[in-house]
Image (tube, grey):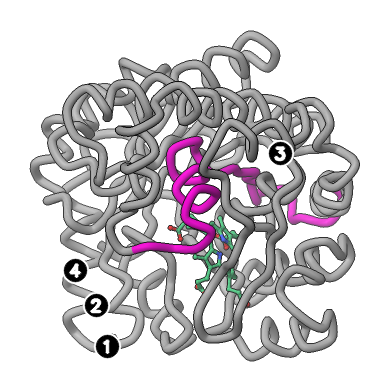
Amino acid sequence: MTKLLLRALAGETLPIPPIWMMRQAGRYLPEYRATRAQAGDFLSLCYNPELAAEVTLQPIRRYGFDAAILFADILLVPQALGADLWFVTGEGPRLSTITSAADMARLKPADQIDERLSPVYQTLRILSAELPRETTLIGFAGAPWTVATYMVAGRGTKDQGPAHALKDSDRETFTRLIDLITDATIHYLSRQIEAGAEVVKLFDSWAGSLQGDDFDDFALAPARRIIGALKERHPTVPIIAFPREAGGRYAGFARATGADCVALDNSVPADWAAEHVQIDGCVQGNLDPRHMVTGGRELVAEAQRITRAFSNGPHIFNLGHGITPDADPDNVARMIDAVRSA
Ligand code: CP3
């Protein structure tokens, strides 16, 4: 019996879609907060294989999701490349910045990231031994553009201004940074697959800020290169691409990159996506995460509307972005019931 998530990714239309949630291991769960406190802080949790595996398993035990996503962060790759990384409570990530060829020269080559990232591979090995046999294990990385926006700015930004500025003023340095992250991502995801990841997902959270040719050059082309290289090494492992807020550019993204599935943010109308994106294969999404805070009849109605809109093709039910710390854990169970009874 093949796992449900893998069947959807292979293009099968299922009577009930497999379900998981972005950030399903997170601060809305009291058991997550307890384990995070035990680890000390967020990064120590990411680099502690036993505890990272524990928090990955918590939402599986509580809700029986069809997939578990590795607990780690997209910013571990810049750190492994030599950037300083820390998290400021209540504010988010901070990194040393890359704004010149001289900064680039201080970074490590793409194939030297394992020294730092080997605990992540160990987390996957633990998970592949401990997960229930019906649960699919998902590995992930940030897409080059999104990772570059943090490396250039040294923090999260509203409009990704510093990365746009470097791209426009020193395209050569910016392109070298994108190429380095692309190579590191191919290496990192290959190692994750070797350690037990059955599916990998590429998070391009800021793809929506790239317009026209820039979208082709910095969202589409790196995704195509990463997916092509992974398919060569691991032809049977499905790949999910998440070019968040790509809008009309979601159409054709799977065909252009070779992705097996495209994840949709919640700004995309499900009926439009069923017609223009799902024609190329599996889609994932796309409930607005605010329903996990507000709950009620609206949550049930929206979860069922999305499930029905995608019911004529392969679909993985998920949120359009990560669940937030203020979500009510009971709403997650309500969402799962609503999808399974749609
Ligand atoms: O989905 C999952 O549960 C898997 C684990 C995962 C995390 N981050 C754990 C995390 C994944 C896939 C990510 C991806 C990630 N990280 C992205 C891309 C997806 C997205 O959300 O847009 C980005 C941009 C980051 C960078 C990052 N990490 C930020 C901006 C923050 C701070 C914001 C926040 O929510 O606090 C993080 C921290 C982070 N990553 C947390 C978790 C569970 C919260 C840390 C904590 O426990 O305090």
Which residue sits furthest top? 232
Task: State the CA–CA distance, disc 2 to disc 3.
Answer: 31 Å
In contact (CB < 8 Å): disc 2 and disc 1: yes
The foreground one among 115 and 174 is 174
Work out whether 135 lies above or below 109.
below
Please state the horizontal and vertical placement of residue 79, each as a whole percent of the image: 72, 51
Q: Name the residue under label 1.
A: 294
Task: State the CA–CA distance, disc 4 to disc 1.
Answer: 12 Å
> Nearer the N terminus, badge 4 or badge 1?
1
> Nearer the N terminus, badge 3 or badge 1?
3
Asked which secondary structure carries label 1, the reply is: helix
Q: Mark 4 points at which residue?
A: 302
Q: Residues within 10 Å of mark 3 (few under 14, many from 20)?
A: many
Q: Residues within 10 Å of mark 4 (few under 14, many from 20)?
A: some
Task: State the CA–CA distance, disc 3 to disc 4.
Answer: 31 Å
Asked which secondary structure carries label 4, the reply is: helix
Task: State the CA–CA distance, disc 2 to disc 4.
Answer: 5 Å
Which label number is shown at residue 197? 3
Task: State the CA–CA distance, disc 2 to disc 1.
Answer: 8 Å
Q: Name the residue under label 2.
A: 299
Residue in the picture at 35% in, 80% down? 292
> Nearer the N terminus, badge 2 or badge 3?
3
Q: In which quarter of the image is residue 61?
A: bottom right
In contact (CB < 8 Å): disc 4 and disc 1: no
Query: What amino acid type should be assigned to the residue bearing mark 2?
Result: Leu
Nearer mark to the viewer, of 4 and 1: 1
Nearer mark to the viewer, of 2 and 3: 3
Query: What amino acid type should be assigned to the residue bearing mark 4?
Result: Glu
Q: Residues within 10 Å of mark 2 (few under 14, many from 20)?
A: many
Q: Give the range drawn in magenta.
A: 129-157
In contact (CB < 8 Å): disc 2 and disc 4: yes
> Nearer the N terminus, badge 2 or badge 1?
1
